[in-house]
Structure formats: structure tokens, C-alpha cells
Amino acid sequence: MPTGKRKGISAKILEELYDEVKAYAESHEMTMSDFIERALQDALHPKFNEKEEITMEKTRTIAFQTSDEIFEKLNDYLHRHGLKKNKFFLDFITKVLEEDQAMQDKQKAEKEMAEAEEDEDMSEDITATEEEMSDGAIRS
């Protein structure tokens, strides 16, 4: 564990969780403080690589350039929100693509409904014309 000035932290947790933490710490020859510090470090600074989250799918790289100002603003935003660039962009791209697909689905459904109504109107016109012709043939 890193050395340096220490500060206290206190939290109320469920008794069962406390017992589990205590047993784990003892079995790994750690103090409770060591365990809590390690858990906090792992939560705040994960050691896994973002790429490990990606499945065995084939992946491609997207790269682009931006101004220093936008780059710094992005880094500040990501830092404030505890986000990684990769996750931020993948989530954003996925959201935009899902919204676009929903829009396309809506437009397709509206087009199909309009075509169905048009077909229904044509069918009614044909039926009316046939009835008119039929009436005319009877009168003649």
C-alpha cells in the first residue's frame, strides 16, 4: 500500500458484509484498513483495460483530430464524470445510431401505413366504379 499521510473514514455497513470483509482480510493477512484502501483504489482506479470489456468481436479503429481547446474541454468533462474516452464515444455513437434506427423504423411504418391507406382508397374506388358499371348495365 502507498505510504503517506492518512485520514480516517467511517461508514455503517450491514453486519453480514462486515463479517465477510473481516474474514476476507484475515484470510489474506490484511488489516481492515488495507482491505478498504485496496477496495477504494480498485473502484476509483480499475486495473483492467477497457479493451478487456470488448467481446471477441472483430474491432475497428476510429480516429479524428480536434482543436486543443475542445480536447482539453473533453478531458475535463471526462475527468469530472469519471468516464473513459473509449466508453464515452462508444456510448455516444451507440445512442445516436439507436435514435437513427428508431427514426428510420418510424418513417418506414408511416410510409407503410400511408401506402395501406392508399391501397384501401383505391380498392373502395374500384368497388364503387364496378357498382356504377353494374347499375348502368342493368339500366340499359
Image (spheres, rainbow, N blue to C red):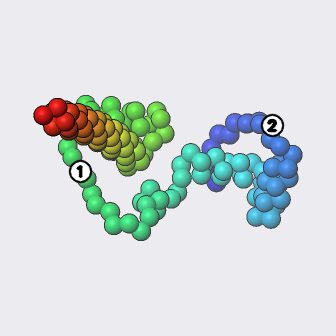
Q: Residue 113 carries which label?
A: none
Q: Where is residue 93 in the image (x, y as percent from the top left)?
A: 33, 44
| Residue at point 81%, 49% (across, down) | 17
Q: Which residue is drawn at 72% across and 52% down?
A: 34
Q: Within 10 Å of the Cα at label 2, are there few (<14), some (14-19), or many (20+) other Cα atoms?
A: few
Q: What residue is disc 1 on?
A: 63
Quadrant the C terminus occupies: top left
- Can you give x and y, in whole percent of width and height, for residue 116 in the image? 29, 40
Dot 1, crowdedness within 10 Å: few (<14), some or many (≥20)? few
Residue 111 is left or right of residue 79, and the answer is left
Q: In this rendering, is residue 87 above or below 80?
A: below
Q: Which amino acid does label 1 sit on?
A: Ala
Q: Distance between the residues labelled 1 and 2?
A: 46 Å
- Which residue corresponds to mark 2? 12
Question: Closer to the camera, 87 or 5?
Answer: 87
For badge 2, the amino acid type reads: Lys
Mark 1 vs 2: CB contact within 8 A: no
Observer-nearest residue: 116 or 46? 116
